Image (spheres, grey):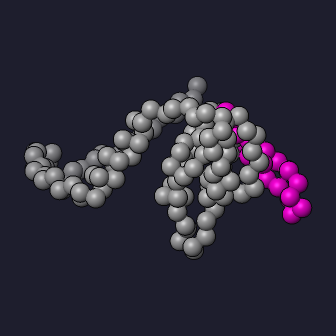
């Protein structure tokens, strides 16, 4: 018959739990008015009711496009479609046509989101659009 057991070390405390402070007093930091305004603006924009436009309306900056089916693909050096990009695909995707949403990177370059927004400006309802980003 064999048995196995653990040996636990004895713990020694440097301080008693009664010596620890029981109450901490803090003061709230004042809110930054610019930050509060920015958050309120985003909440207001998110709460706007979206209205469908007539078929001849061309999307412009500030509009929201709802892509019923969005499929992103990588392309080779010849511009031919390769692998699907799962992170850039979906259904009923809301895309805000805004320069603020896709500012330049630290290196001063704009990425695929900027190209997508620029490519969708002028799109019309029901139109199939290919955007190279």
Q: Is residue 58 one of those drawn in magenta?
A: no
Q: Name the residue at 10% across, 45% down.
A: 22
36 displayed left or right of 24: right
Q: Is residue 76 one of those drawn in magenta?
A: yes
Quarter of the figure that contains the N terminus: top right
Q: Position of residue 45 (x, y in %)?
A: 41, 42
The residue segment tinted magenta is 68-87
Q: How many marks?
A: 0
47 lies above or below 79: above
Residue 54: quadrant of the picture: top right
5 lies above or below 33: above
* Towards the viewer: 106 or 33: 33
67 lies above or below 29: above
Instruction: Report whether residue 116 is seen.
Output: no
83 displayed left or right of 123: right
66 displayed left or right of 73: left
Q: Position of residue 42 (x, y in %)?
A: 39, 46
Residue most extreme to the bottom: 107
Q: Position of residue 38 (x, y in %)?
A: 34, 53
Classified by dominant secondary structure, the portion drawn in magenta counts as strand
19 displayed left or right of 80: left
Q: Position of residue 72 (x, y in %)?
A: 74, 46
* Towards the viewer: 119 or 59: 59
Q: Name the residue at 63% across, 62% down.
A: 111
* Towards the viewer: 41 or 57: 57
């Amino acid at each position: 018959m064999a048995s196995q057991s653990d040996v636990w070390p004895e713990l020694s405390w440097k301080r008693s739990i009664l010596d620890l402070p029981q109450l901490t007093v803090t003061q709230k930091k004042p809110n930054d008015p610019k930050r509060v305004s920015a958050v309120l603006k985003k909440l207001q924009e998110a709460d706007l009711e979206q209205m469908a436009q007539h078929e001849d309306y061309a999307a412009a900056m500030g509009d929201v496009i709802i892509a019923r089916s969005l499929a992103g693909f990588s392309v080779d050096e010849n511009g031919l479609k390769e692998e699907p990009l799962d992170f850039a695909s979906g259904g009923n995707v809301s895309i805000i046509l805004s320069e603020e949403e896709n500012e330049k990177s630290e290196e001063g370059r704009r990425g695929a989101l900027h190209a997508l927004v620029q490519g969708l400006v002028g799109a019309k309802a029901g139109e199939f659009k290919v955007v190279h980003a």
